[in-house]
């Protein structure tokens, strides 16, 4: 059961990043504009897409799970602070807290690693 729960948790976390990354690809110019409005150079967008899509895939397949989870947790906290920290705006604060909660889940994944259905687990088994 624990193995399935580990995989299900990784899958649920990954879908958010995968969908977000593909959304940024489909709305590339709009996303660059949104980033610029927050003072970020649009040139960072390809890196953001790579992190979201690549990190999402890595979580699903359980590849370098601990490091990917840490990177995505840091990204989630930064995104929360840059894009959603608006104490007077209830919806933005909900998004802020959501991002922090996602980061918390990712830190749990970073602590436990991928225990099943994972490249990492197969690699550990091969070196045992």
Image (cartoon, grey):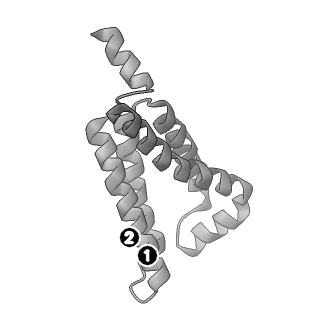
Residue situated furthest bottom in the rendering: 88
Secondary structure category for the residue under label 1: helix
Tell me whether the residue at label 2 lies in contact with that at label 1, contact meaning CB atoms closer than 8 angstroms: yes
The residue where tag 1 is placed is 94
Identify which residue is drawn at 42% across, 49% down.
Answer: 72
Q: Residues within 10 Å of mark 2 (few under 14, many from 20)?
A: some
Identify which residue is drawn at 35% across, 10% down.
Answer: 126
Q: CA distance from mark 2 to mark 1?
A: 5 Å
Q: Residues within 10 Å of mark 1 (few under 14, many from 20)?
A: some
Answer with left or right where residue 36 lies relative to residue 83.
Answer: right
Q: Position of residue 113 (x, y in %)?
A: 32, 34
Q: Position of residue 4 (x, y in %)?
A: 41, 34
Residue 66 higher or lower than 121, as above or below: below
Identify which residue is drawn at 41% across, 76% down.
Answer: 85
Looking at the figure, which quarter contains the N terminus? top left
Residue 117 higher or lower than 31, as above or below: above
Mark yes or no: residue 72 visible. yes
The residue where tag 2 is placed is 97
Answer with left or right where residue 36 lies relative to residue 88.
Answer: right
């Amino acid at each position: 059961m624990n193995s399935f729960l580990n995989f299900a948790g990784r899958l649920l976390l990954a879908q958010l990043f995968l969908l977000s990354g593909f959304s940024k690809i489909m709305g590339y110019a709009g996303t660059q504009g949104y980033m610029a409005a927050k003072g970020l150079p649009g040139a960072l967008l390809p890196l953001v897409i790579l992190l979201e899509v690549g990190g999402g895939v890595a979580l699903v397949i359980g590849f370098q799970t601990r490091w990917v989870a840490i990177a995505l947790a840091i990204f989630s906290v930064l995104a929360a602070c840059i894009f959603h920290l608006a104490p007077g705006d209830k919806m933005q604060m909900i998004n802020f807290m959501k991002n922090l909660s996602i980061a918390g889940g990712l830190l749990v994944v970073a602590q436990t690693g991928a225990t099943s259905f994972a490249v990492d687990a197969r690699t550990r088994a091969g070196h045992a």
